Amino acid sequence: MTPINLVELALDPAETDEVLGAMRAVLERGWFVLGPEVRSFEEELATAGQVAEAVGVASGTDALTLGLLGLGIGPGDEVIVPAFTAFPTAVAVLQAGATPVLADVRADQPHLAPDAALAQVTDRTRAVILVHLYGIAADVVPWLDTLGPRSIHLIEDCAQAQGAVLPDGRPVGSAGAFGALSFYPTKNLAGLGDGGALVTSDTALAQEVRAWRSHGERAVRYRHELPARNSRLDDLQAAALRIRLAALPARVERARAISERYAAGLDGLLPYAAHGSSGAPHLAVVRCPDPESLIAHLAAHEIASGRHYPYPLDVQPALSELATSPTPNAHDWASSCVSLPLHRRLSEDDVDRVVAAVGSWAGP
């Protein structure tokens, strides 16, 4: 029996040749940091995301952190984040010097719950981070309508959702103050290492983030106006990302087809976090009462699986002091989630095999 992997990161031969050719051009040019490849990638990324600006940085975490700093958010400020998300969402707030405030997610979707988030708003709240978890696009319009009159920024964490479309038709990342993207190798737009970007239509914010990513230089070289870090995207990464950005729509369509097949096959067996026609599937997640038992059962059938994420943020040792209110839905998601294989090399027969294995565990 051929094993089915959770992810497949190796490049296909044709893509390998194309990426090597693009990288060879960078090597021959000899400009490796914030050069023409980065500028071209930023322009193409902004166009694809229907925003005015894209700023390449070292990681998705840095995209969040530098975006917060660019908005002037720091010590004394609070930023509301979902209690069920990847760890870096909250850490980025801490790195900006602000305080993350954990709020519960919805019971039916892994998205921040409006009532829980609004209950945490104080006069120190400067922003809310809405995470499009698993590649499922959350509806931003009610958030904008609610937060706008309060002068609270809406930030979109799109690390798992590049290529997804909001319910109103806009790309994710284009509606809030900014969107944060990750190019970690498992992400929808996958780099060959770490990388990220901030996308926004706020030109002033983009310019400020460019200073925060490069030692605080705003206009004059070697004149440092901000106590900033080095968080720059390099040209070798940008060269590969330009190629993969062009292929992203086709990859998203393929992932949607796989997710739709999972949704149909798992119906009546276990709850599945469906992506719908507007999502950009990053993780295919089912919920069950005993995740470790299901994972062991799948492994016996040579099917890899995972947990995203087994611990809500309010029990993470580094964040446990931040817990200020109950987050039962976040705990329910964390205690029940299992990620199934999802990658471009999955065949329909592979998906059916995974579904059959899940069904043999779940019973009639």
Image (spheres, rainbow, N blue to C red):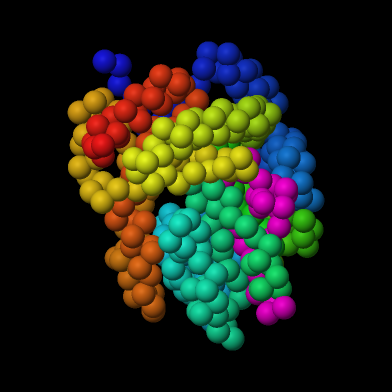
- Judge whether residue 58 can be spotted in this image: no
- Residue 345 in view: yes
Q: Main secondary structure of the magenta part?
A: loop
On the rendered structure, is 238 left or right of 103?
A: right
Quarter of the image with the N terminus is: top left
Residue 272 vs 297, above or below: the answer is below
Q: Residue at x 50, y 21 (%)?
A: 11
Q: Position of residue 363 (x, y in %)?
A: 24, 37
Q: Is residue 220 rendered magenta in the image?
A: no
Picture quadrant where residue 30 is located:
top right
Q: Name above or below for residue 309 compared with residue 28.
A: below
Q: Nearer the viewer, residue 272 or 184?
A: 272
Q: Which residues are magenta?
A: 149-176
Q: Position of residue 275 (x, y in %)?
A: 53, 43
x, y percentage for residue 158?
58, 50
Name which residue lies at 46% across and 57% down: 108
Residue ID at (39%, 78%): 325
